[in-house]
Amino acid sequence: MDTPLNNKLSEPNQPKYDVIISGAGPVGLFLACELALANCSILILEKTENPNSPLKQLPFGIRGLSTPTIESLYRRGLLDQLEIHKRLKNPHQNAGQGVRRQVGHFAGIPFHEGDIDTSQWTDRLPSSTDTSLISEISELETILLRRAAALGVYIQRGLGVTGFNQTDDSVTVSAGDQSFQAKWLVGCDGSRSVVRKAGGFEFAGTEPEFTGYTTLVDIADPEKLKPGRNMTPTGMYLQSQPGYLMIQDFDGGAFHSSEKPITCEHVQEVLRRVSATDVTITALHTATTWTDRARQATTYRNGRVLLAGDAAHIHAPLGGQGLNLGLGDAMNLGWKLAATIHNKAPEGLLDSYFTERHPIGAQVLDWSRAQVAIMNLSPQARALNAIFRDLMNTRDGATYFAGRVWGIFTHYNLGDAHPLVGHSVPNFAFDDGTTIGEHMHDGRGVLLDFGTNTSLKTWVSEYSDQINYVSGRANDQLGLSAVLIRPDGIIAWASDNDPDFGELQKAAARWFVR
């Protein structure tokens, strides 16, 4: 019998799905899991037959997972399935750095573990998850595929979206010689998104400064190249392991745009110029190019079509923030789209996906542009680079950059005066040994009551199919008495004293329907 992941759906009368997702990468898979968790029927269409690309394997596929991503995985019971971080702390660590363990970088300038003052992050509790972890694309996809199968998500491989037509109540999606129907279509199909192009979304932004190369090569004399990340007068190269090379050539993105074949001779010429060595490449096994082009869709929705991940925003993969940004899109969108499908969405709920996530995306694009600006080859950029290096070698500087890179400061402006509203809920640890994150596996909202207030328990019963009631004392309650938490882990309302039921009701009505 076919499983959901293998079913080719060849019947002449195709079912109508709640959502079709274009793209089976981590963002598409995570979004599918969030929607299926909320009892939506999901079909993923993926153009590639084989999910196992060499560029997804170590070290090409290495990604640093940020705090919001780690918390999202934890809140869905997936974090303990990650294994790579247990044996791999930093694949790009330069030799000879000893106890000053590099834990991240900005424009190639490292910040170190011992320089970060985590006490400045007052909402981080002893029970909080790690602030950053190393994983790889293939590991994440394996975990999410397993979860998708358990939740009944259908995936068709070798069948990419080629176009669509939408009406007021449905979308008909074309893929090869087949067509499929759904209430909604979400493009998670990457930087060259067919959904974005077919949907007429404006993709505004800036043009590139460089062509980046990611390669697997054989090198006759690898000792001529320094390990780790190396900034040079003509660019940057990174050797994480012998033969695994990343190169930045400040050619204005010309080679990437030319779409010329990547030959062994060309990679050698670029590497020699950037590294200022006469290193010899004897074989080229795998190579791809990329740029720092930074673009963002001016809206993430057109009728019944939405965008997430790289389909909605692209930028240089400096610091690996693109994956985290896309997974954040999925976590934000999933519960809102599910509520809309089930007619449980307050007015404007789905529109809040764009109003919340677009500013976060814009910040990441500017963060990427800033890095490129001080990696440039001009004397002005070199001067700025030296100043940033000095700043990052201070305790406050390292703490700030780590907080930005790891997403510690990520929050949504929800217009509430309480300082925690719009922020990720701290991982409160209760006296019974559980944490708040463990109470969020079912993807529902939570009313957290630290005082066992019977009035709160009665109030929340009106939302019994959307909000769970959790009560108990925590080891550190941060002075709070009660907290309303959205399904994505964002605090919607918080009270330090006796709860104001008028304010609680107002906050709840913004995100939930009785």
Image (cartoon, grey):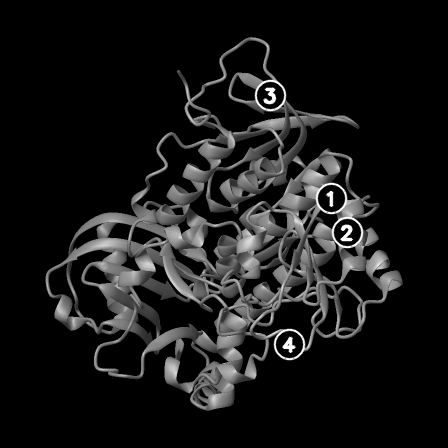
Q: Amino acid at mark 4?
A: Leu
Residue depicted at x 82% and y 43%: 514
Which is nearer the N-term, disc 4 or disc 2?
2
Mark 3 vs mark 4: in front: 4
Q: Are marks 3 and 2 in contact (CB under 8 Å)?
A: no
* Residue 95, position as x, y percentages in the image: 22, 77
In the displayed orientation, state which residue is furthest to the right: 502
Local SS, label 4? loop
Residue matched to label 3: 180
* Circle 1 SS class: loop
Q: Left or right of 72: which side holds 281?
A: left
Instruction: Find the distance from the CA under tag 3 to the CA under tag 1.
Output: 34 Å
Mark carried by residue 427: none
Q: Amino acid at mark 1?
A: Ser
Question: Along the polypeptide, which appears first: circle 1 or circle 4?
Answer: 1
Amino acid identity at mark 3: Phe
Q: Is residue 53 above or below residue 113?
A: above
Q: Secondary structure at mark 2?
A: helix
Visible in this render: residue 172? yes
Q: Are marks 3 and 4 in contact (CB under 8 Å)?
A: no
Q: Quadrant of residue 419?
A: bottom right
Q: Are marks 2 and 1 in contact (CB under 8 Å)?
A: yes
Specify few, some or many for label 3: CA neighbours under 10 Å numbering under 14, 14-19, or 20 or more.
Answer: many
Disc 1 target residue: 464
Disc 4 designates what residue? 478
Q: Which residue is labeled 2 in the image?
A: 460
Q: Nearer the viewer, residue 489 or 208?
A: 489
